[in-house]
Amino acid sequence: MSRLVLLCGVFVLLVELLPIGSGGAVVAAPATRIVASDEVIVVLRDGVDPVAAARELGVEPTYIYRDVFSGFAGRLPAATVAAASRSSLVELISPDAPLEATRQVNPTGVRRIRAKDAWADPVPDVVNADVAVLDTGIQRKQAPDGQTSNRKARDLNVRNGKNCIGSGKATKDGNGHGTHIAGTVGARDNSYGVVGVAPGVRLHAVKVLNADGVGSVSSVVCGLDWVYRNRGVINVVNMSLGDRGDISTCANDAFHRAVCRVVDVGIAVVVASGNQGEDAANFIPANFPEVITVSAYADSDGKPGGEGDRCGRERDDTYASFSNFGQVVDIAAPGVCIRSTRRRGGTVLSTGTSQAAPHVAGALALYFAANPEASPNNARIWLLNKASVPQDDPDGGLLSGGQGRSDEPVLWLDGVTP
């Protein structure tokens, strides 16, 4: 099983995602992949009812998928996978894998990417866009430090969502990672806490990781299934999670297929590159071509030039030593000592590519608010051509990139025109 890891902050904590359901490895011809685990995701042929198919195949499903594709997750003994893949009901079978999370975000990052240059004048109470945060949940009510009992405090504009972990509908954050990510994306511009890149944007808590920051491919596909169902609402998905995984295609892997379906209906998907200091091509979902993969750099003073203090081992305006890199990375954003919303009130610092990704998700929310008919490809073109600068740009770039990292542009907003 593969672990989806939270790519986050101050603690830089890597939490192993334990299997929470079944996931899919492709065993069906023509694209056969090895399924080594009993936990699988089964993608069915169009028109096949997933409940009836699971019953016929003798599987007790942990997740049922009806929107992003027809299928289910569950336990299928490895010895029976080959036979099941030959069933007329089945299109492909993929292995389920654990995924991990990283941690949180800082207002210097909002200044560093010049987010205010892309805000409307005057700044609206709500940026008119919708971002689904697939994470540990989002705490709906926050308050200033020392006022955690203030139930009227709502620093985040949280709307409906989905719980893919355990029973019930609650999307409350038992970890803090998802709330921190949400704050970077869109904390309100008010009198306390932090302000997000897209202040007041509508946030949808899609809980795919548990209180330990642990989830699985099947739980994340459950979240993407909900996103696809709400395709007329959601503009952007943020996934600050992942784990090691092979290169795949939309045709031969359930997780990859779910992402492709979401992008195909006009939703941009932003993911963190990972915190191993390695080639991001070895990690999922960072290596999916359809997503926007984000690496991290250090910023401590909200401006270029390298004159800010160090944060830990990371020098101001340099590529983060822990950040994954390589050709699959699309853009770099602030990800070191990022301050954002704490689930129990106030703010907290965190570091990781998990913190970098929501800067980009927030930037895309601003873009879609101003350009509601734009496609994910339009957004990618805008991001890489008009919302970024080369890494060595003297006005907005970095002092150093490092081996394999010099080609990654740096997020740098200059309005939201296409």
Image: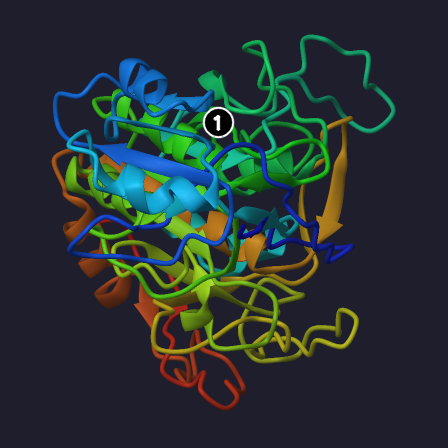
Tally of numbered tags: 1
Query: Can I make out residue 195 in this image?
Result: no
The residue under label 1 is 206
Q: Nearer the viewer, residue 222 or 349?
A: 222
Residue at the extreme bottom: 403
Query: Tag 1's secondary structure?
Result: strand
Farthest residue in the right direction? 146
Corner quadrant of residue 264: top left
Q: Residue at x 74, y 38 (%)?
A: 347
Describe residue 249's horizontal placement relative to residue 102 as left or right.
Answer: left
In the depicted structure, whether residue 388 falls above or below residue 212: below
Q: Give the x, y percent position of residue 380.
A: 23, 56
Question: Could you tell me residue 384's position as x and y percent?
Answer: 26, 65
Position of 141 relative to 416 (above/below): above
Whether residue 218 appears in this view of the structure is yes
Would you call the spot at circle 1 few (<14 residues within 10 Å), some (14-19), or many (20 or more)? many
**Where in the figure is residue 35, as x and y percent of width and height?**
42, 52
Three-letter residue code for mark 1 = Val
Residue 46 in the image: state x and y as whole percent: 12, 27
Determine whether 102 is above or below 228 in the image.
Answer: below
Residue 310, picture quadrant: bottom right
Instruction: Decide if residue 171 is on the left or right side of residue 358.
Output: right
- Residue plotted at (67% across, 66% down): 300
In the rendered structure, the answer to whether residue 36 lies left or right of residue 51 reads: right
Chosen colour scheme: rainbow
User: On screen, 282 above or below 97?
Assistant: below
